[in-house]
Image (tube, helix red, strand yellow):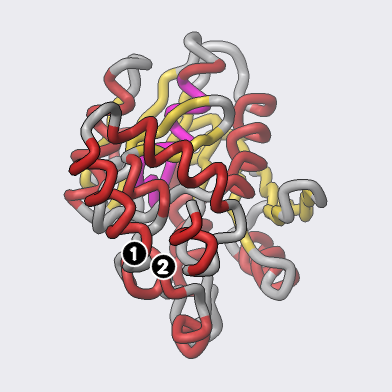
Amino acid sequence: MERLRAAGCVFADEEARLIAEAAGADAGTREALLRRRLAGEPLEVVVGWAEFAGLRIPVAPGVFVPRRRTELLARLAIARTPRAGTVVDLCCGSGAIAAAVAHARPDVTVIAADIDPRAVALASGTLAAYGATAVVSDMDGALGALHGRVDLVASCPPYVPSARIALMPREAREHEPRIALDGGLDGADLQRESLAAAARLLGTGGVAVVETSEDLASLTLQMAEAAGLVAVVERDADLGATAVVASR
């Protein structure tokens, strides 16, 4: 605990408890996990899971760690998807949004997609328990059969401007894949692609929910409207979350 505190871990007591829980009774394993954390690995990767929407979502090195603020997207998807509807989670990473929706809405068909095979392999194992699936896809490239048939598209694409990656916390910039962080010159490259994909996937009355930042919210809104969708901004102050909700 003292070593974690000395390393600058704000919640050292809680981190020590979680590391001890992950290691069990093996002192060697506990020391190895502690050293990984002290070296800057995200706590979630060290212990093997992240808390998200009341679930433990498995995480692994080289895959984006789901953030609590993204629970806003999961909540919106759960509330806005009609009964027996179809949900697509684009840029799914570990599959946290898809898992939360599938867990809360067993009546819904949930498909997650990501360009990174490592992320899809991890998400597939998680989602199988909830009757959902994950596929390797560059946006909707592998989802052509679903065009015009989807009720809700949820997407948390990378939206950090390229020049700001160096300013991110060490654990993110050194231990998460750049492809999952870098949103391009203005931070909105993947948002544009997500919204364009949503416009192809959604049927009449369908809804897209896309995570963004407060700085980018106006631009994300404009891009949704340019994609032919009617959009509004949703915020959750407690989570520090901002999302654009765009309807066909």
Give the mark nearer the N terminus: 2 vs 1: 2
Residue located beneath label 1 in the image: 176
- Residue 197 at what x, y percent from top left? 44, 53
Kindly identify which residue carries mark 2: 171
Q: Quadrant of the C terminus?
A: top right
| Residue located at (32% from left, 67% from top) | 39
Residue at x 46%, y 20% (from the top left corner): 102
Q: Could you say which quadrant of the image residue 42 lies in? A: bottom left
Give the residue displayed 23% in from the left and 55% down from the top.
116
Tell me the magenta residue range: 89-102
Instruction: Kindly check if marks 2 and 1 are in contact, taking CB atoms under 8 A apart as contact.
Output: yes
Residue 243, percent from left and from top: 68, 53
The dot on residue 102 is none
Q: Which of 231 and 77 lies nearest the eye of the viewer? A: 77
Amino acid type of the residue that numbered disc 2 sits on in the rendered structure: Glu
Magenta-drawn stretch contains 188: no
Residue 182 in picture, x, y percent from top left: 42, 74
Where disc 1 sits, the SS reads: loop
Is 181 drawn above or below residue 43 in the view shown? below
Q: Can the viewer see residue 135? A: no
The number of numbered badges drawn on the structure is 2
Q: In this view, does 150 lie above or below 216?
A: above
Q: Is residue 241 above or below residue 81?
A: below
**Residue 220 placement (x, y as % from top left):** 65, 66
184 horizontally vs 71: left or right: left
Residue at the spot 45% in from the left edge and 40% down from the top edge:
50
Q: Identify the secondary structure beneath mark 2.
A: helix
Residue 234 visible from this viewpoint: yes
